[in-house]
Amino acid sequence: MLPPGAGSPPGPQAQPPAAPYPYAAPGPGGARQHPDPGEAPGRLPGQAPARVPGRQTPGREAAGLPGECVPGVGEPDAGPLDAASVAPDHPQDIFSTTDIPGQRVPSPEHGYGFPDDAFGSRAAPHPDDAAADGGWSASAEAADPPVGPPAIPVQRPDRRPADRRRGLTVPGPRHPATPAAAGTARDTATTAAPAAPAAAAEGTADTHTEAHAQAAAARRLARRIVKAVGFCAAVTAGTMLLLRGNEALAGLATAPAAPSAAKAPAVPAAAPDPGRVVQIVAHPDDDLYFMNPELRHSLSAGAGAGHSVTSVYLTSGEADGVNAGAAGRASARPDKRAYAEARQNGIRAAYAKMATGDRTSAWRRTSVPTRGGGRAEVDVLVARPEVHLVWLQLREAGTVHAEVPDSLRGLWDGKAPRLESVLASGSPVTEPYAYSRDDLVRTLVGILDHYRPTTVRAQDPTPGRTPATGRFTDHQDHFYGARFTQAALAAYAAEVKDRPHFAVQNYLGYSNGSLPGTLDPQTSADKLDIMDVYAWVDRENHCGSSAGCGDLKVADHPAGNNWTSNINHARGSGTSWLASDRQHGLWAFQVLDGQVALWHRAGPIGPWSGPHLLPGTGMDPGVSTVTLPDGRIAAFATRTTLGEQPADYRREVVYAVQRAPGAREFGAWQSLGTPEASDADRTSDISAPAVSVDGTGRLAAYVRDGGHTLRGREQRADGTWGPWEAHGGAGLLGTPVAATDAAGRRMVFAATAASVTAWAQPAPGAPLGPAAPTGLPQTALPLTADAREGGIRLWLRKPGSGDVRTALATTAPDGTPAVRGLTDLGGLQGFGAVAAGGHVLAARSAGGHLGAELGEGRPWERSPVLFVGDPSAAVTANGTTVNLAVMGLDARLYTTSSPDTPKAYLTPWQPIGPSNTGQPQP
């Protein structure tokens, strides 16, 4: 946390503090989006105060330096982080300087650096570009390259003039000459000048001896300097080896590792990069309800590191304009602009609380032009200027389900040619505007183009309908906003080439209320605490706004419909995206830039290559892999086609097969279609595919359909595929999982709200049997299945705690599945799927980092990696090594490994490939 404070410390090197950000308008508040009436139960008991991020020494992070400044070495403590010390990835660096001394302030004439000064071509560098002030990137040195090697650290100040007196120049930074230094320069010039002829003729033995002694001393000093330079270079190289050496040892370059690299001891890797996160949501509070605690994890990880967290709000969320709870609704006067302001105040207060611990922490609010021809309000948190809020302020639908032409849904479907703005009172945006469908897409592309995210968080674009009523299971603004995000991401990936790779994570919305809780009590209480801030529960006028400091509509029930006890990813929840081959190599598959990305490690200790993007766009997050009998790998995923017309929107199952075992080339993506009749039917609501190969070598893919039943396609003996078949089940949730037991019989499992349902082949090649109960208790989503001990071992999460459980499933003699031996394994709380490989278990822990258990009875360990989706594990073909992989928030692959033996330990996590700095890989 970087709280505001006084200026720089006194002293000859202290700089005058920059002028603090003024309040352009009322600051933070406490608000959140209104739920559907009647959907918000009472708040959770045992609410705990929010945890405040730990404080760091301010003023250093902007220059890419550690949070502490050692007295006497380098510059002094620069004091609180202010506008002048901020590195260049925030609005005050991308707008022109205005009339506030000492800081850069956005001006209305300058946008986010897009074409025509709107959200587009960036007018200032982001943290990965070279920064003249020596920011986050090492390439910043290119702005003023030093002449020669770095200066040698001076340990004895009285020795510095002596170096020059002997006529030796130490290359380094230029400093103003002191009197002593000037004298030294004159001495040097005199010594180097040719002697007068008379003086040379009169030279004596003493003169020659003295000259010889001086020359010898100079040579000795030169040798000492060379040794010192070499020593410093060695120390520097050693330090870099400590920080980055494992990249070379792990073969992160595409060239083969040196023979000695495989024998070099493991050294710690650099701290994982928290990346740059952009969240795009429909309403103020969607991020707090459905993306937290991952939002909070990103804010904590990026503290002082210059890695931005930006939330984009598509609509104003003005609803009916009444900012009151149930008791005050009758007497409240509707004012849509004021209610929109109150919700903005609530969001600013919630973010300030999460980022600094102080809900009243100041914001700088600015109006900027957008690429779509409108304007956006951009708010920058002064104490944490890498935290941004972008308000597009479009009209919301005002209803969860009913069709309203003037809405995101109407704009997407062509029922409304343009959607108008509803500007919040107090906003620096004062002129109304309207967007066409293309205008909104271009506006979002512009925002993405400016912020250059490595992770994009969005809502679920295919939430489905409730089978009994046919109503959407989520707010229409949520999933149509997510579709606009999909369109913008596709255009951004296709049009902007000098950008980093990006990963996408989608989140469930209202349906979280009917799912088992995924969060432990403390995390849930922390999430509720932030909702209390947003909802302005205490009614204290801390923001100074007559509109209110938060969203009183939900102050009666800030927990919503059990939403503060839950978070669920809508896609990308599989754990089979890391695969091993017969040569003990590894293959990793993730989705970057809307394409499946492939990484490969040849052999057990070879170098990694990748990411290589396989041809084909529109790929949804989440890839599942399976190894065919001949050793080739098949990758399965879903693909979204936006189409030219709204009715063309389609999500389908696709797969690609490796051309030969060990080959990097894969065949073209082939479509298995979808069991859904049309998008209008059930919003293309299918799960990611669960895939397996039975004992006859035939593939099968299974999905949960929009009716919450199991559907599947199975390969025939001739290699062709049969039709989509119905396999029953009822109330299925999430993504099913599949695996094949030791007898070659595939089994499929899917969670329900109360238990787990199972299907089994009675024999290899036989049709899948009917749905059968397992008797397992309620479990949080998602599931993991792996062939072990002759059957299929399941790993699940205990609701309300995040602890890991396991049970063994087998096929009875009559062909029905049987599950036994449910065991609690503990863990580090958290949520999401559990990756299993050999003796190693890995899963997201509380705080968002990966937790791992390396054997029965051993304590769980927490890693430093924050990641997208879920981890994956694979055991090498010889069975000696377990490998783990995650996709970091910086859109880089991170891996670790462990011998598959008792008492083994994980090696340090290593990033694979070059830093994701903005240039896409070929």
Image (cartoon, rainbow, N blue to C red):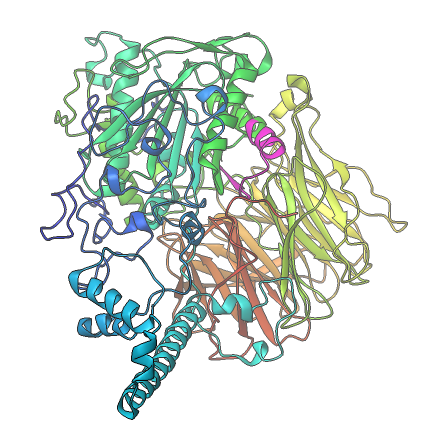
Residue nearest the viewer, comparing 19 with 507:
19
- Which of the 4 image quadrants contains residue 223? bottom left
Q: Does residue 898 appear to the left or right of 147 in the view shown? A: right
Image coords of residue 912 (percent x, y): 55, 59
Relative to 921, say whether 151 is above or below: below
Q: Can residue 45 be seen in the rendering of this structure?
A: no
- Which of the 4 image quadrants contains residue 723? top right
Q: Does the magenta stretch include residue 500?
A: yes
Image coords of residue 527 (percent x, y): 30, 41
Relative to 797, say whether 903 is above or below: below
Relative to 906, say whether 218 is above or below: below
Q: Does residue 302 appear to the left or right of 775 in the view shown? A: left
Outermost residue to the right: 718
Residue nearest the viewer, comparing 834 with 270:
270
Q: Is residue 307 magenta?
A: no
Residue nearest the viewer, comparing 176 with 425:
176
Residues rendered magenta in the picture:
488-506
Image coords of residue 397 (percent x, y): 44, 14
Residue nearest the viewer, comparing 369 with 117:
117
Q: Can residue 296 be seen in the rendering of this structure?
A: yes
Image coords of residue 233 (percent x, y): 41, 72
Which residue shows up at 33% across the image and 71% down it? 192
Outermost residue to the left: 10
Which residue shows up at 30% across the image and 15% down it? 424
Q: Does residue 922 appear to the left or right of 363 in the view shown? A: right
Q: How many labels does the image show?
A: 0
